[in-house]
């Protein structure tokens, strides 16, 4: 095909350009009308008055009394849920990849069962179970229930992330490890999982963001004193400044989740650079055996990898 006609089909004609300009102008007009309507509605109800926003900028009391304790509880619940759900998800994800039917089938049933149930139902059920069958204090019972619900749901989601990450690796990685005599458990722990971490990291961090936001369900239903639950007493104490309270809390959620995703992006880039420095292919090792690049070097002694 001649060079001057190769990309003609992708060029926009005059009418297409005019339509795009018209759509852009219409969108801007609609957006401006929506912004004006929201502003006018809030201003007419005195929600934008400085007196309702003043406590957050001139006093530390709302931060120390309401926001900081709520943020601590949110991060505490998210932290415990993650450190429990992540290893559980890895175990069930690996279990679903097992060659043994007696292990693969139960793992699949557990994962699909808890992944299908809304996390709010899991929290309510856990709270009722703790109330009925344990002596856990009512002060910390909501925390236990929130963490339990988050663990059961997110462990099942993380199990699928782990399974997908391992399945995304080339079959040659497994074949190379088998060729030097590695057992299945060694292949999984020392070859597949280290390489799958980079592929799974964005999805894991996305799930962590979901965990942080889902802690608000405990505040709405189980009276768990997390960040979003601090809006009601804070608004009642500062003159019904509900919009200001929700705005400040929403900005805090944005900052926290942006920090998590930024850290994940930095960590992913660092892991990828580390793997590039060692290569990304399967080749022959110095001793004539196969060496899987991108994971710790495979050394063979007496026919076994160490």
Image (cartoon, rainbow, N blue to C red):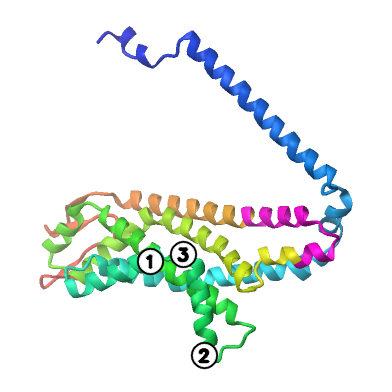
- Residue at 78 percent of width and 65 percent of height: 234
Would you name the residue on which mark 2 appears?
134
Is 251 colored magenta in this rendering?
Answer: yes
- In which quadrant of the rendered view does residue 75 lie? bottom right
Which residue appears at 58% of the width and 52% of the height? 258
Within 10 angstroms of label 3, few (less than 14), some, or many (20 or more) residues? few
What is the secondary structure assignment of the residue under circle 3?
A: loop
Q: Would you say 258 lies left or right of 278 here?
A: right
Mark 3 = which residue? 118
Magenta residues?
A: 233-254
Residue farthest along the bottom direction in this orientation = 135
Residue 105 vs 27, above or below: the answer is: below
Of mark 1 and mark 2, the one earlier in the sequence is 2
Element assignment for label 1: helix
Q: Secondary structure at mark 2?
A: loop
Q: Which mark is residue 156?
A: 1
Q: Earlier in the sequence, mark 3 or mark 1?
A: 3
């Amino acid at each position: 095909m001649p060079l001057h006609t190769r990309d003609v089909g992708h060029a926009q004609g005059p009418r297409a350009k005019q339509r795009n300009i018209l759509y852009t102008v219409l969108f801007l007009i609609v957006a401006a009308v929506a912004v004006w309507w929201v502003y006018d509605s809030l201003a007419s109800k005195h929600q934008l008055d400085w007196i309702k926003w003043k406590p957050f900028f001139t006093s530390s009391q709302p931060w120390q009394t309401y926001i900081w304790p709520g943020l601590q509880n949110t991060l505490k619940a998210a932290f415990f849920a993650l450190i429990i759900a992540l290893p559980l998800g890895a175990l069930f994800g690996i279990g679903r990849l097992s060659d043994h039917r007696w292990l693969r089938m139960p793992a699949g049933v557990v994962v699909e069962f808890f992944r299908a149930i809304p996390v709010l139902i899991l929290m309510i059920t856990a709270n009722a179970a703790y109330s009925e069958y344990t002596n856990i204090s009512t002060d910390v019972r909501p925390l236990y229930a929130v963490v339990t619900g988050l663990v059961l749901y997110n462990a099942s989601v993380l199990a699928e992330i782990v399974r997908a990450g391992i399945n995304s690796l080339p079959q040659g990685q497994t074949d190379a490890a088998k060729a030097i005599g590695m057992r299945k458990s060694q292949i999984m722990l020392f070859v597949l999982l280290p390489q799958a971490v980079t592929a799974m990291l964005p999805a894991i961090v996305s799930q962590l963001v979901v965990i942080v936001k889902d802690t608000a369900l405990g505040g709405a239903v189980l009276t768990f004193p997390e960040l979003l639950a601090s809006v009601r007493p804070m608004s009642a104490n500062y003159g019904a400044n509900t919009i200001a309270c929700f705005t400040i809390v929403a900005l805090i959620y944005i900052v926290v989740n942006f920090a998590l995703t930024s850290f994940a992006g930095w960590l992913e880039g660092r892991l990828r650079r580390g793997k590039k420095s060692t290569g990304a292919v399967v080749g022959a090792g110095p001793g004539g055996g196969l060496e899987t690049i991108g994971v710790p070097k495979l050394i063979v002694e007496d026919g076994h990898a160490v």
